[in-house]
Image (tube, rainbow, N blue to C red):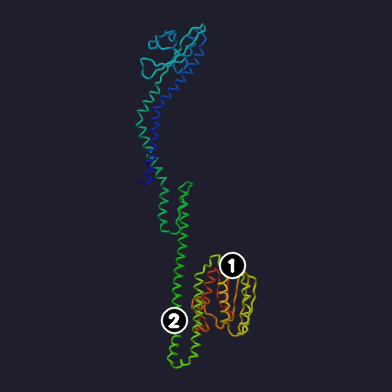
């Protein structure tokens, strides 16, 4: 059964039951309560009459009774002297003479008349010491009529109560479940995880609080789903990058290995120029050295992928200035050997980083500058509080296409296709992975005056 039907039946039944029980209680207990109130009222009035008559002579008592009877009393007064009615002057055939007379005695007249007649007696002592009896008779006829009327209209009242209860229960059940239905409808829509759904119901009751909780939970779920989608996309991109990297790596390894196998076969067979074994053995060693460097770079990339840069246990306050100062003698000597003009300006700078990998990235950046500087060209290194800038006068400026691809694995510009000049093609790829993991900003660009500039921000 739905909540609307349950509310309707419960409220309707509750109203019907309350009215039924109320009528039953009135029918049962109203006569009893009315009788108690009536008796107390008569007792109080008779007590006042007794006080007014007590201690007076007989003639005064009769005179005062006549005066009192002319007032609107809730009972009728009778005066007995022994068993004789003294006031009013009528015979009393229905008195119970055999009963003892107490200070207050309630008796029922016999035979009964329509309605219930009750009496209350009290002794009065006159001025000369004579005892006379004052009797007050009162009727319960009104309450008896009321009970009969209540019983007669009982079915009508029940029908009216049923009609009223049905109307009230219908209105309440519809209004009380309206917000719940809206909440349920919105919750079903939220299953689609569409953006912008909300269910903010007005009010301060539990349903309004539930709607706010559901909306908050949905928003958090949406954010979690978005983050998961981003992470899934990153994972997919990473997997595609790894596949592409493995494909290119296998190609990079296959070509020199095939070349070296051809050289070795030629030397073994003594074919043509391959008879000059000393020369080709040196060539084989050169190829092996290149492959060794390539393998070392691949291992470095693998370690970078495995290293958890986000874990603070790998991070430290790193004095970048000290590292560069330690490398300056080597670069000054290299610049002197190659005829380069080498300038630098270093400020005191510390950063939070993984020292080992950041040093590797910095060395690759500076080594690249020395490798691709034109003869007698200039190289500058500038370190400030928020930037590291490495500039060199390049032999050949990179095209826009080269600048966009230079950080890809195994990418070498056309002018450096030769491994002897271009290296393994993994140097800047390693730099890109390290700096990205540190969330540092970096860029490589040409300047208007013929320089190539690498800028690192943190």
Whether residue 207 sits left or right of residue 440 in the image: it is: left
Please report whichever mark, 2 or 1, sits nearer to the chain's N-terminal start.
2
- Furthest toward the front, the residue is 268
Is there CB contact under 8 Å for labels 2 and 1?
no
Whether residue 421 sits left or right of residue 386 in the image: it is: left
- Furthest toward the bottom, the residue is 272
- Furthest toward the top, the residue is 128
* Along the line of sight, the residue nearer the viewer: 104 or 293: 293
Q: Residue at x 41, y 57 (%)?
A: 191
Quarter-of-image position of residue 120: top left
Q: Residue at x 44, y 78 (%)?
A: 250
* Along the line of sight, the residue nearer the viewer: 420 or 122: 420
Q: Residue at x 36, y 17 (%)?
A: 113
Q: Which residue is mark 1?
A: 316
Image coordinates of residue 402 in percent, x first then y, are 51, 78
* Along the line of sight, the residue nearer the viewer: 377 or 446: 377
Q: Which residue is mark 2?
A: 254
Image coordinates of residue 358 in percent, x first then y, are 57, 72
């Amino acid at each position: 059964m739905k909540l609307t039907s349950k509310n309707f039946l419960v409220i309707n039944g509750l109203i019907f039951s309350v009215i039924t029980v109320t009528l039953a209680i009135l029918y049962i207990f109203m006569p009893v309560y009315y009788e108690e109130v009536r008796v107390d009222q008569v007792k109080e009035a008779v007590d006042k009459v007794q006080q007014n008559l007590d201690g007076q002579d007989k003639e005064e008592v009769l005179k005062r009774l006549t005066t009192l009877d002319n007032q609107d009393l809730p009972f009728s007064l009778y005066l007995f002297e022994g068993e004789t009615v003294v006031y009013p002057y009528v015979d009393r055939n229905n008195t119970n003479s055999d009963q003892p007379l107490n200070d207050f005695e309630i008796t029922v007249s016999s035979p009964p008349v329509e309605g219930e007649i009750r009496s209350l007696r009290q002794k009065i002592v006159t001025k000369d010491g004579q005892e006379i009896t004052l009797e007050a008779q009162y009727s319960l006829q009104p309450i008896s009529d009321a009970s009969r009327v209540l019983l007669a209209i009982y079915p009508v009242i029940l029908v009216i109560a049923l009609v009223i209860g049905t109307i009230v229960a219908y209105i309440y059940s519809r209004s009380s479940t309206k917000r719940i239905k809206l909440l349920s409808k919105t919750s079903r829509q939220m299953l689609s995880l569409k953006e912008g759904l909300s269910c903010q119901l007005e009010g301060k009751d539990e349903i309004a609080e539930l709607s706010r909780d559901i909306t908050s939970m949905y928003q958090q779920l949406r954010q979690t789903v978005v983050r998961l989608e981003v992470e899934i996309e990153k994972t997919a991109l990473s997997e595609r990058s790894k596949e592409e990297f493995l494909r290119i790596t296998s190609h990079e390894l296959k070509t020199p290995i095939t070349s070296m196998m051809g050289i070795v076969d030629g030397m073994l067979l003594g074919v043509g120029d391959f008879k000059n074994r000393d020369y080709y053995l040196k060539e084989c060693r050169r190829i092996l050295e290149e492959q060794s460097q390539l393998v070392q770079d691949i291992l470095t990339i693998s370690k970078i992928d495995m290293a958890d840069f986000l874990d603070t246990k790998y991070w430290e306050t790193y004095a970048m200035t000290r590292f560069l100062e330690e490398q300056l003698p080597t670069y000054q000597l290299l610049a002197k050997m190659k005829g380069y003009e080498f300038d630098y300006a270093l400020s005191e700078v510390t950063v939070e980083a993984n020292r080992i990998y950041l040093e590797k990235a910095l060395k690759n950046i500076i080594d690249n500058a020395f490798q691709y500087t034109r003869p007698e060209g200039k190289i500058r290194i500038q370190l400030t509080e928020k930037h590291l800038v490495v500039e060199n006068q390049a032999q050949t400026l990179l095209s826009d296409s080269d600048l966009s691809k230079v950080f890809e694995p195994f990418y070498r510009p056309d002018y450096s296709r030769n491994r002897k000049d271009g290296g393994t093609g993994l140097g800047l790829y390693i730099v890109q992975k390290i700096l990205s993991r540190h969330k540092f900003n970096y860029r490589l660009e040409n300047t208007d005056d013929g320089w190539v500039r690498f800028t690192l921000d943190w």
